[in-house]
Image (spheres, rainbow, N blue to C red):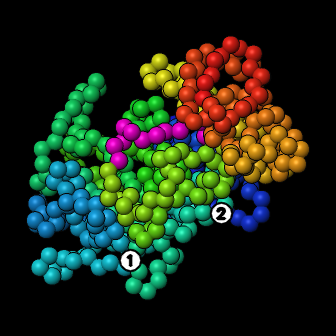
Amino acid sequence: MAGSGLPSLGRVKLTDLVPSEGLPSDSYKLSVSTLSQSLAQYSAAIIQFPASDGALLRSGLDSARLYFHQRASYPAADMIHTNDSREWCKTSGYYADPQMWQESYDYRPGLTPNEPNNAMEFPPAGLPDIFGLLGKAARVILDAISFYLTLRSSPFIEILDNVPLRHREISSSVLSVCCHARPSFQGAQHDLATPEGGQLVMYPDHEHQADKSMISLVKSDRAGLHIRDFQGRWILVDGDLGPQEAIVYPGLALYQATAGYINPALHRAEVNSMQGSMHGRCSISFKLMPKSMTSLSCSEMRAAGHGVEAQFQLPVPVDDFMQRSYPTDQLFHRQNIHCFNFPPAQDGSMKPLTRRRKNDPRSKPLPPSKRLRLEAQRVLKERVQDIADKKGIKLRFCNLKECENHVHTLESPCANIRMEIGWPPGVPFVHPHDLPNKAKIGFLEAYEPGWAATHDMELSLTEPGQASQHSVNCNCNSPIQVSY
């Protein structure tokens, strides 16, 4: 995998992602690396379940087909889904969205669905067991992502539901059994498109969406789930799933909690011509959700030494987060994150992907200041962290204002660390993300001599209020003029 990206979605065995005491095994590190690479490249990955769990998922899909097949052709008025974000943690039972040509049954432990006219209805079979299976898998995957980001163990435990739920608690996470395009369902008309191959394809009116979950797991009985990759292409992700495999992808809540380091998946459902199918396309979807009375904070990311953009600085109450709309074309995507704790043969694979993205003529050029920031973060991951790991040094960066006062003194608290890792003289020992632009260039030149000469950026960088506050020695060899 070194030196090139994954040719297709990464496949990872769930059992290989289960952590154990002591040092991480090679299989665990390789599985986390594959998962992380696949999420960065495709915003999704394939999870392989044990055989017994695969049988449970297939049984659930069989039950779902029968459940929706016996439903009425058109739902009662109170069953029409209104997409009210205020009710995000209260959905339970049968819902229908004629505009999306979709029906669903939400299973939420702790909440009993209200049936119309007090009618007795039997839900799809096996939902409690499937909820437990996928819920446990989602938490294992979330911990693997935390390992990839060098966060502490179970860093998001405080914003997730108790396991098991306590008395009278209602689950924030939800298991949805869905059916798209059931032939007997009187859904709304949909836009039709004919691709080059001539096959008739239908997409819902809302072209794509992003879950507000931490992690989503989806298992379907027919292909049709498309997710947009990091190059903007729509990829069919469930076209060759095995009977024991499911798709996993990140949601907006994880994007917020990781300060944008884990991109959310933009997805849409394709409904092929259903000739010969009497059930439509059925799927089982589990969404690991944060608790409603908590807040999404990036404190864990800061504690691990990651830079946090201004838009992620303040904690966001989960209830407020769920009621906001998020234009998907304005999401901030980071493409420079590498799994720097792993051997080069396993963590080098994302480097050419990053360069290809930057050199892609279809990509909109980044502003010089952002390119500097991305380069500084890359060098931190690829160079500085490698030096620190080899010397057994834990990087704990200083506060910028405090470090400016003691960086030139021999008795500064960070003097020994700076000397050990070869930190450039005069540059404050803070996360490169937070350095002034001129200091970033000094940092880059120290660890990659000649960097400025090989990067043909016209840097017209202005950072208000910094010109009189920062003075940094920069050994740049090229005539780049920088103001900050």
Image quadrant occupied by the N terminus? top right
Assign the magenta stretch its main secondary structure: loop
At x 49%, y 39%, the residue is 333
In the image, what residue type sits under mark 1? Ile
Q: Is residue 57 visible?
A: no
Does the magenta run of residues contain 241?
no
Answer few, some or many: residues within 10 Å of disc 2's Cα (few below 14, many 20 plus, some between 14 and 19).
few
407 or 109: nearer the eye? Answer: 407
In the image, what residue type sits under mark 2? Ser
**Range drawn in magenta:** 326-337
Which residue is the extreme one toward the top? Answer: 479
Which residue is the extreme one toward the bottom? Answer: 167
| Residue 179 percent coordinates (x, y) | 26, 56
Q: Which residue is mark 2?
A: 153
Q: Is residue 295 visible?
A: yes
Answer few, some or many: residues within 10 Å of disc 1's Cα (few below 14, many 20 plus, some between 14 and 19).
some
Q: Are marks 2 and 1 in contact (CB under 8 Å)?
A: no
Q: Is residue 98 left or right of residue 379?
A: left
Q: Is residue 160 above or below residue 396?
A: below
Q: Is residue 410 above or below residue 151?
A: above
At x 46%, y 79%, the residue is 165
Which of marks 1 and 2 precedes in the sequence?
2
Q: Which residue is mark 1?
A: 170
472 or 45: nearer the eye? Answer: 472
| Residue 398 percent coordinates (x, y) | 72, 49
54 or 445: nearer the eye? Answer: 445
